[in-house]
Amino acid sequence: MRHIISVRDLRRDEIDRLLDRAAEIEARHFDPHLLSGRILGLFFFEPSTRTRMSFESAMARLGGVSLNMGSVEASSVAKGETLADTIRVVSGYVDAIVLRHPKEGAARLAAEFASVPVINAGDGAGQHPSQTLLDLYTIRKSMPLDGLRVGLLGDLRYGRTTHSLAIALSLYGAEIAAIAPKGLELPSGIIHELNGSGTPVTEHTAVEEVIDDLDVLYVTRIQRERFPDTASYLDVASSYRITPDLVLRARPHLIVLHPLPRLDEIDPGVDALPNAKYFEQAHHGVSVRMAMLSEVMT
Ligand code: NCD
């Protein structure tokens, strides 16, 4: 049985193999009955559009079906059931579990109580490995993954997609520019981990300082739901915005990624530039998650 909880659980060769598999799937080389008769359980304790629907789509395209817990309010969680008990019970209903939860560490805990594979679809400010795989997949379609200069911009404190991506990029000899408003910097533990694996990290408060040197700019929204109060969110809201002018002065091959949803951090005028890859990135979620489901369910 195989769980996918953190990118730290994956070796570089395993990531490359999953990305290769996703490329074959995108080229329509897959068995549409591979997961026929199998059931995927979707447990989302936080909002989701892309992650939930692309896992559902991935499962359907492989011939399987999905069962969705539905909203927290409509489930027994509202009666006070613990995550451990929910997971123990639903392990008998489904063949794999996709879990999103506001608490960091929830997916790791679920894996302890599950008798089927668990895929972490985001645990608080922790990890989001399926997003990272589709981020890497999108980058790899534009340029080789080795030795890139990647700017991570936005809420690097609470943004789990940046935490996962930074750790995965360290397997590919990346240099990371961490660009964040004051108070939302990349956690020092992650910086130490990156440095320890030989990944240089520079810290910045303005994207203008580094954009000229980047191959990839990964933009994220401020994770309002993780802020203690509205006032502290308003202090940093709308503090950065990528505009067409800014992208046009960067290196021509720069690609701009965003896990989405976007608020106002990327001007819609950027969408039409060839550098903007965030909608393609979201579409790759299906092929990449098909590769992941094939991996853990067969
Ligand atoms: C991200 C998440 O849930 O962490 N969304 C996603 O899965 N694409 C990013 C975000 O919510 O900002």
Image: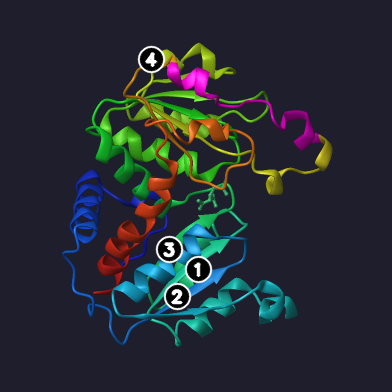
Q: Nearer the viewer, mark 4 or mark 1?
A: 4
Pinpoint residue 260: horizontal percent, then vertical percent.
53, 46
For marks 4 and 1, give the CA distance: 41 Å
Span colored in magenta: 232-248
Circle nearer the N terminus (3, 2): 3
| Disc 2: which residue | 114
Q: Is residue 264 left or right of residue 60?
A: right
Indicate which disc, 3 or 1, sits on the residue closer to the N terminus: 3
- Which residue is denoted by mark 3 in the rendering? 54
**Residue under label 1:** 110
Disc 3/disc 4 C-alpha distance (Å):
33 Å
Residue found 25% across the figure and 40% down from its top:
141
Marks 2 and 4 sit apart, C-alpha to C-alpha, by: 45 Å
Determine whether the residue tagged by mark 2 lies in a helix, strand or loop: loop
| 4 or 1: tag closer to the N-terminus | 1
The stretch drawn in magenta includes residue 247: yes
Give the CA separation, mark 3 to mark 2. 23 Å
Disc 3 crowd rating (10 Å Cα; few below 14, some 14-19, many 20+) is many
Q: What is the quadrant of the C terminus in the image?
A: bottom left
